[in-house]
Image: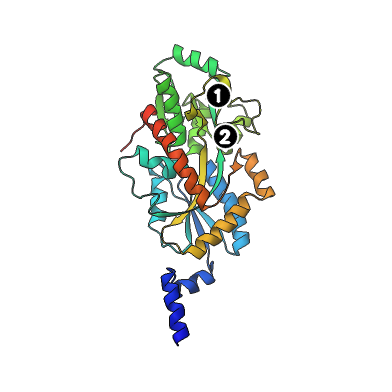
Amino acid sequence: MRITTALAALALALGCTPAVQAQTGSYPSRPITLVVPAGAGGGTDVVARVLADELGKRLGQAVVVDNKTGASGMLGTQAVARAAPDGYTLLVAYSTPVFYAHHIFAKVPYNIQKDFAFITQLASTSVVMMVNAKVPVHNMQEFMAWAQQNKGKVNYGSYGQGSAGHLMSAYLSESRKLDMTHVAYKSEAPHIQDLAGGVVSWGLGTIAAAQGVLKDNRVRPIAIFGPKRLAELPNVPTMAEQGFADPEFNTVAWFTLLAPAGTPKPILQRLEKEAVEIIHSTPMKARFQVFGLESVPGGAAQFHKDFDAVDPVIQRLVKISGVKAE
């Protein structure tokens, strides 16, 4: 009896009650949901579905993807913040609701560092600057001349108010005094389709979402917003290679895995271990590359380190771009 009492006391001291111990010991005992705060067909959705397949095999349970769009990714993110911290509802998010929202929006319905446990970053990608095929430009020098000639008449799309695509596009417009108009979409897929259809003249997007329209030449890639060229578009130079050396043009889009705060540590450790092994496996790296994605150094500690490092860069990007929203 004394041994049992002592063990219970130790479990409480470690923040793990006997009930939680039983729960974590059998985890997972039912399907897991990956909430994606973006629409189907975009980069985040692709990452989540690839992860779900592999994670399900390793955990021996179904892992399903639930797309919850709205409010620039904050709707789905808030849903996970309010979910039971039991490891059965997780968040696979893109940059906006995790890295950008607290700098852009006056009211964010969660605190990303207090309401979530960081598990790992999954992948990153440089976004591609694309123009509609009818726009007569093939590189940034031609784009700048065309934009100046059509000052005040050019519109561009993004995959959401306050998204990385919106911020970097607005930064280009504001820093070069181009006076271009932003058109926000609810997710990446409709943005890319309208870009291909000529509703907007140009925009930034991921290869994952733009593969089809790139292959049929309805859009033309002219620059990479990121530190290096993409393997899938080896002939498309970076912004820096074309004379745009601003560090803001090197900002990459991140895809991340998080859980509600309070999720038991053993569950977080299990998820971290499995996810990190998945993203660094040779088959997964090959699958990522097809979509212009790159595996990143994984783990919760690295996630926190990268968050702290990129935060001041995003602050500058938001300030200069002038992007603010209610």
Label 2 amino acid? Ala
Residue 108 visible? The answer is yes
Query: Looking at the image, is mark 2 or mark 1 earlier in the sequence?
Result: 2
Q: Position of residue 276 (x, y in %)?
A: 59, 53
Which quadrant holds the C terminus?
top left
The residue at which mark 2 appears reads as 210
Residue 240 image label: 1
Q: Residue furthest bottom?
A: 1
Label 1 amino acid? Ala
Q: Position of residue 181 (x, y in %)?
A: 39, 24
| Other-residue count near label 2 (Cα within 10 Å), few / some / many at <14 / 14–19 / ≥20 | many
Whether residues under marks 2 and 1 lie with C-beta atoms below 8 angstroms apart, the answer is: no
Count all numbered tags in the image, as a single digit: 2
Residue 39 visible? The answer is no
Q: Secondary structure at mark 1?
A: helix
Whole-angstrom CA distance, mark 2 to mark 1, is 22 Å
Residue at x 45% of width, y 73% of height: 11
Question: Relative to 321, is 231 on the left or the right?
Answer: right
Q: Nearer the viewer, residue 199 or 162?
A: 162
Q: Secondary structure at mark 2?
A: helix
Q: Position of residue 215 (x, y in %)?
A: 64, 31
